[in-house]
Amino acid sequence: MILLEFAKTGRLSGYDKDFVDQPSTSRRAANAIALLSITACAAALRFHALGAKTFWFDEGVSVGIARLDAYNFLRILWRREANMSLYYILLHAWLWLGNSEAFIRSLSVIFALATIPAIYFLGRRLFDSRTGLVAAVLLSVNAFHLCYSQEARSYSLMVLLCILSSLYFVKTVENQSPPNRRAYVAFSALAVYAHFYSLLLIVAQYLSLRYFAALQASSGPWKRTWRTIAIVVSPILLFVATTGAGPLKWIPRPGLKDLWSFAILMTGHDGVLLLVAIAVLFAVGIYPIIRSTTREELWPSQFLLVWLFFPILVVLVLSFARPLFLPRYFIFCLPALLLPVSSGLRRIRPGWLQIPALLLVVLLSLRGTISYYHQDFDNERDDWRAASTYVLSQAQPGDALLFHVPMGRMPYEYYHSLANAGMASPTVLYPSHGPRITFLDFVEKPDYARISNSLPQYRRVWVVIAHAETPDGFDLKATSLMNLAGEGRRNAQHTIFNGIDLFLYQ
């Protein structure tokens, strides 16, 4: 009767999937112990060497935004950095408790660890408890997820909220109760405020509901749900409409090599063998789409396929006009890959082969994780720790400092705040708008006349160049600042750090 009702209406009124997948007391205890053990292992992997790597540019910007006063915080969000605004708010509160690199990044680790039980509950609702546990294992050792669990950015929060949004989306499909709807709206809106690309998940949810669940996605209750979400995220929609893709203009157009690297990254960054293993298990996991005739068995796989492929394909198409494809922006699609893979592992016959197959995937994934500890694989980590420490250690009273990229001042100021109070520090001439950092210090273009008038009173001038490379050398802005600093001075020193060129004129 349950299957017949779902096939006819797409809704299981009065039905709780947990009741159908109701384990015994001993099984529930075993699942709880297993989930705690998996989460503990994930914690060990994510807290390991948490403060070993320097803050790179984006992480320094995160801290710089979170440290602003309320007025400047709101201005920079509206002017340029509305994306990840939820994370910046949470980080602002987190900074009251500590300010070391490891402590700041631990906020992302907390979100990542909460994601482990979240994917278990989503897997249990879509498939069964054991599939949920396997998905938790695969997520815990996935190098892509671990990498962004250790960054002072919003990506681990984004994954958590997208899973919770999808969990309550599925719950609302099964039981359209007001609590389920409210939770779905809340987590969906929060996911968008954690990262703009979460909007693509909401569209994917709509499409799966409209075309695969035999429900009227535009019916009264669902129409009110979509309308509520749209109202709550309307400030984000207005921001995107007014600023367009301007903040993302630095993203290059993707090629086939980039797509291959993205596939390697999503599957755990251990090369072709792990990619092939994940692809085979994924195909086995979505096999019900081919052989099943019952919508109840079809829909979970169909929903996950739309979740995985729709956001990626849409952005790839848009990237022909305006490049918008960046691998880390699609980390929220990772659960939609791992859940069918987990289902595929559970479908292996004979059953005793499931454990060795899982161990193989885990071991290959751990190799990708270990490689991440030694070397980044998704960005060029500019070494602001070393560059900032060098400037502060070599500075003399009366030195001046110019930054080629205004927001480059933010990671420098973070490391400056950790330095000894008695150390000499250069006077920042650009960007500078007073004794405190303001929103203008993130975005304003240089006033070359003002800088030129200020420089003669300084005997030594430091120039920090980052992200300025062109086929012919440095870009025009970097060259202009270097020329100003070199008026009446000689280039006494050129020190290169990873991603940063440091010049001293005296």
Image (cartoon, rainbow, N blue to C red):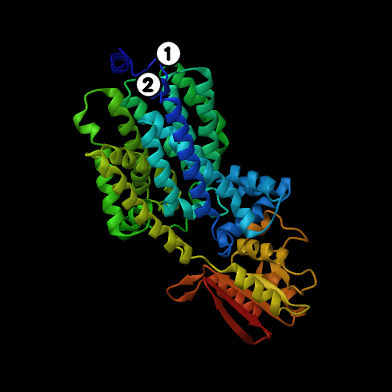
- In the rendering, at what x and y percent does residue 505 appear? 66, 83
Compared with 222, 426 (above or below) is: below
Crowd class of label 1 (few under 14; some 14 to 19; many from 20; radius 10 Å): few
The label number, if any, that marks residue 271 in the structure image: none
Residue found 24% across the figure and 40% down from its top:
348
Answer few, some or many: residues within 10 Å of disc 2's Cα (few below 14, many 20 plus, some between 14 and 19).
Answer: few
Identified at 65% across, 66% down, the residue is 412
Look at the picture and state if 342 lies above or below 429. above
Residue annotated with mark 2: 20
Name the kind of residue labelled 2 in the image.
Val
**Front-most of residues 428 and 342:** 342
Q: Is residue 419 left or right of residue 322?
A: right
Q: Quadrant of the N terminus?
A: top left
Query: Which residue is drawn at the image coordinates 36% and 26% (left, top)?
Result: 209
Query: 199 above or below 443?
Result: above
Residue 192 lies, in percent from the top left, at 52, 38
Can residue 68 be seen here? The reply is yes
Q: Position of residue 274 (x, y in %)?
A: 31, 55
Q: Which residue is mark 1?
A: 14
Residue nearest the viewer, comparing 109 with 86: 109
Q: Quadrant of the C terminus?
A: bottom right
In the image, what residue type sits under mark 1? Gly
Q: Secondary structure at mark 2?
A: helix
The residue nearer to you, when weighing 377 against 276, is: 276
**Vertical arrangement, residue 394 with respect to residue 63, above or below:** below
For marks 2 and 1, the one nearer the N-term is 1
Which label sits in the foreground, 2 or 1?
2
Identify the residue at the far right of this view. 422
Position of 23 with respect to 487 (left or right) is: left
